């Protein structure tokens, strides 16, 4: 996608479509006001007649507005004046682009970047715009047969700015937003692919392909024999019942010499039956999404490497299938992790933490500046926070605050959660160093405490994304979260934010 900035009037731009907005009580956005003047109150008259709505998410598409050079004007509802935030801004941009999906529009101008949006300057407005455009254009149809519908041929997006001094920040925001949108799309694709296609080997091939031709990015893949030599008994206990071999994927982007890297670890269970602790059949198809942690860190690597940031970033993906079989791990079995600690497996459906703990131990060799694992780990997190925010756990208050701030800026929201000895005590086992579950109370917290046992001496955080990684129902599909949050965190660490 190409991006440009302009201080010119909306009515004077010969684009295929100009995006403007209207607030409650007929208040017009800056772009809408200019078009209304040029068209001799055309928009005001439509508002009075009830043909234009200010309801957020609603868009009225106008064709051949008199006095306006653009062929179309998309009028987005913005709600109450003075209350527009980044979520509402992104919703308005995405809805406007979706209203054009059946058109042959090549170029659009987004004038909503002139509006006052809470906690957003020119950089984040352009970045949110680029990410929203990417979200609106995304489609997943590669598994369908027959003739595919031609996509909207959009290739150029303009952002209105108030003064020329804002151009550099806006252009950087658009560039970063486009890279993040591509990373989100990759994460969505990986999540949406069925488990008979997106296997551990498929994830490994994807990671290798990304590194091909990229001088700063390398990918290494460990097989089960190599993991066994390293003592990864916990991870291998999960893949024991699967025919498809497990993989450990390590991607390294080196943009900052010998600096300590940020290390992201993503849970890559490409299908989770629950193992011997078999899940109920209803909605089990959605367990293809149990690798969305892996998809999100791979998508983040795509975004960061394409930005060519001056930072070192390492991605670790333990990729497995969790299947029931005669040689599958049983409840009551005890396994030894790479750290040497032993684990009593009380529930084989608590498998994510079993692969992550060995990946976190393996991460020590990189001496991380910060270590963050990302996982669709617990249903308890969905109960606690719903589908809106991921859970943020950490053994370091400053790191937790840093991630929370990145979540707010990126509008890929999270919420700080507690940890402590009283929760860790729930993991006590009579027969091993720990059990892999801590009972029904505080399930998301005890899962984090389990992982914390493998991170002593490291600045570590855990993101439980079970509630935000995918949507169910009629809009079923991967969301690509939290690629935006992770990218914002890395951008900040790299000093690349304005």
Image: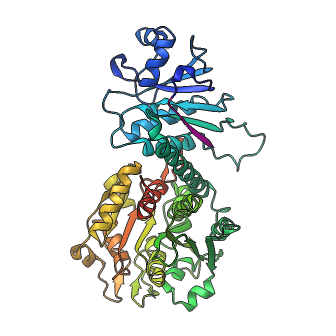
In this rendering, the answer to whether 405 lies above or below 275 is above
Residue 232 is situated, as x and y percent measured from the top left of the image, at 51, 85
In this rendering, the answer to whether 392 lies above or below 337 is above
What residue is shown at x 36% (from left), y 19% (from top)?
27
Q: How many marks?
A: 0
Q: Is residue 389 visible?
A: no
Mainly helix, strand or loop, the magenta region?
A: strand
What residue is shown at x 56% (from left), y 33% (from top)?
97
Residue 135 is situated, as x and y percent measured from the top left of the image, at 55, 43
Q: Is residue 286 visible?
A: yes
The magenta segment: 1-7
Residue 146 is situated, as x and y percent measured from the top left of the image, at 78, 42
Identify the image's colour scheme: rainbow, by chain, secondary structure or one colour.
rainbow
- Along the horizontal axis of the image, is 175 left or right of 54? right
Q: Is residue 118 magenta?
A: no
- Along the horizontal axis of the image, is 141 left or right of 442? right
Q: Quadrant of residue 145?
A: top right
Farthest residue to the left: give it: 422
Q: Quadrant of residue 439?
A: bottom left
Residue 440 is situated, as x and y percent measured from the top left of the image, at 31, 66
């Amino acid at each position: 996608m190409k991006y440009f900035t302009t201080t010119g009037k909306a009515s004077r731009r010969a684009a295929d479509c100009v995006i403007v907005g209207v607030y409650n009580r007929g208040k017009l956005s800056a772009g809408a006001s200019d078009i209304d003047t040029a068209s001799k109150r055309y928009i005001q008259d439509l508002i009075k007649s009830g043909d234009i709505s200010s309801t957020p998410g609603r868009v009225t598409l106008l064709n051949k507005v008199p006095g306006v050079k653009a062929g179309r004007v998309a009028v987005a509802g913005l709600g109450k004046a003075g209350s527009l935030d980044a979520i509402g801004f992104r919703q308005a941009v995405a809805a406007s682009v979706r209203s054009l999906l059946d058109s042959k529009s090549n170029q659009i101008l987004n004038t909503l970047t002139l509006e006052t949006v809470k906690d957003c300057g020119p950089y984040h407005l352009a970045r949110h715009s680029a990410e929203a455009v990417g979200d609106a254009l995304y489609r997943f149809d590669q598994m369908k047969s027959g003739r595919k519908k031609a996509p909207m041929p959009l290739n150029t997006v303009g952002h209105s700015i108030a003064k020329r001094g804002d151009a550099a920040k806006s252009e950087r925001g658009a560039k970063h937003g486009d890279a993040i949108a591509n990373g989100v799309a990759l994460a969505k694709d990986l999540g949406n692919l069925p488990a008979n296609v997106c296997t551990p080997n498929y994830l490994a091939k994807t990671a290798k392909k990304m590194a091909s031709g990229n001088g700063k990015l390398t990918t290494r893949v460990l097989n089960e024999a190599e993991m066994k030599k390293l003592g990864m008994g916990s991870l291998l206990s999960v893949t024991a019942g699967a025919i498809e071999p497990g993989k450990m994927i390590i991607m390294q982007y080196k943009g900052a010499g010998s600096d300590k890297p940020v290390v992201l670890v993503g849970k890559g269970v490409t299908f989770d039956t629950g193992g011997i602790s078999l899940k109920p059949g209803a909605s089990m198809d959605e367990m293809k999404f149990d690798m969305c942690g892996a998809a999100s860190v791979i998508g983040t690597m795509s975004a960061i490497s394409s930005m060519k940031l001056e930072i070192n970033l390492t991605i670790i993906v333990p990729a497995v299938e969790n299947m029931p079989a005669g040689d599958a791990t049983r409840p009551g079995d005890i396994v030894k992790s790479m750290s040497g600690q032993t684990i009593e497996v009380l529930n084989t459906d608590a498998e994510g933490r079993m692969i992550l703990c060995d990946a976190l131990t393996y991460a020590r060799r990189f001496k991380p500046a910060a270590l963050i694992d990302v996982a669709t780990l617990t249903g308890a997190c969905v109960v606690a926070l719903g589908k809106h925010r991921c859970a943020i756990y950490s053994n370091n208050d400053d790191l937790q605050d840093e991630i929370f701030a990145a979540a707010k800026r990126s509008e890929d929201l999270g919420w700080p959660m507690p940890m402590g000895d009283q929760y860790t005590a729930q993991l006590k086992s009579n027969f091993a160093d720990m059990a892999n579950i801590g009972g029904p109370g505080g399930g998301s917290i005890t899962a984090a405490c389990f992982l914390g046992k493998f991170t002593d001496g490291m600045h570590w955080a855990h993101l439980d994304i079970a509630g935000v990684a995918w949507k169910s129902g009629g809009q079923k599909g991967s969301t690509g979260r939290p690629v935006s949050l992770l990218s914002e965190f890395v951008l900040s660490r790299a000093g690349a934010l304005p």
